[in-house]
């Protein structure tokens, strides 16, 4: 389920209340305010008997665009997870260059977050990106690390690639 719309207090409570009242359970979710809008992605489990009723109830929430679709639960693969931390001057195309490289190497982006923050001394805009990626086992990580280092140099940013550890998040 995804929901987007103008931010206001109570959106999460309203959506989760409707899900619970229909016998559903929120298994996983991501929520974020961006500008004046709020966005939610939820993985919800629910009995087939309640699916249609839940969809109708969710559509009754005003000022939100809500979409639902059936999906499957995530199963761990034979891929290794790594974390990318990137920081540097805010330049156009950083996300494009990085995501294009990852796609060319068949590396899947599990999660990616970015934001702008002021530099400590100058206050200049700094671009910050954190990503969790899934790298196939047959890929040599040292080659990926070296290629990412070249990309970071070209973009003028700092980029760190580390094995993903749930405790670091």
Image: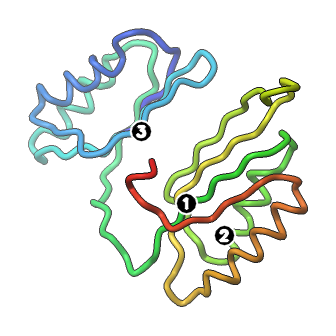
Pointer 1: what residue? 83
Q: Position of residue 69 (x, y in %)?
A: 35, 47
Looking at the rendered image, the disc whose residue lies closer to the viewer, 1 or 2, is 1
Question: Which residue is more in the foreground, 109 or 48?
Answer: 109
How far apart marks 3 and 2 lie (CA) works out to 23 Å
Identify the mark nearer the N-term, 1 or 3. 3
Report whether 19 appears left or right of 82: left
Q: Earlier in the sequence, mark 1 or mark 2?
A: 1
Q: Residue furthest bottom?
A: 138
User: In terms of image quadrants, where is residue 14?
Assistant: top left
Determine which quarter of the picture holds residue 17: top left
| Numbered mark located on residue 30 in the image | 3
- Residue in view at x 52 percent, y 66 percent: 82
The answer for how far apart the CA atoms under marks 1 and 3 are is 18 Å
In the rendered structure, which disc, 3 or 2, sits on the residue that comes first in sequence? 3
Label tally: 3
């Amino acid at each position: 389920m995804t929901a987007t719309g103008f931010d206001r207090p109570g959106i999460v409570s309203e959506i989760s209340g409707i899900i619970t009242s229909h016998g559903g359970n929120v298994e996983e979710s991501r929520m974020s305010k961006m500008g004046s809008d709020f966005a939610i992605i939820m993985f919800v489990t629910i009995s087939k008997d309640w699916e249609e009723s839940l969809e109708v109830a969710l559509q009754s929430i005003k000022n939100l665009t809500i979409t639902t679709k059936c999906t499957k639960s995530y199963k761990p693969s034979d891929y290794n997870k790594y974390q990318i931390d990137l920081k540097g001057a805010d330049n156009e195309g950083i996300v494009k260059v990085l995501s294009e490289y990852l796609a060319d190497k068949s590396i899947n982006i599990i999660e990616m977050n970015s934001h702008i923050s002021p530099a400590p001394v100058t206050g200049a805009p700094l671009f910050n990106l954190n990503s969790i990626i899934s790298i196939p086992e047959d890929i040599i990580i040292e080659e990926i690390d070296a290629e990412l280092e070249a990309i970071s140099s070209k973009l003028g940013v700092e980029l760190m690639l580390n094995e993903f550890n749930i405790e670091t998040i």
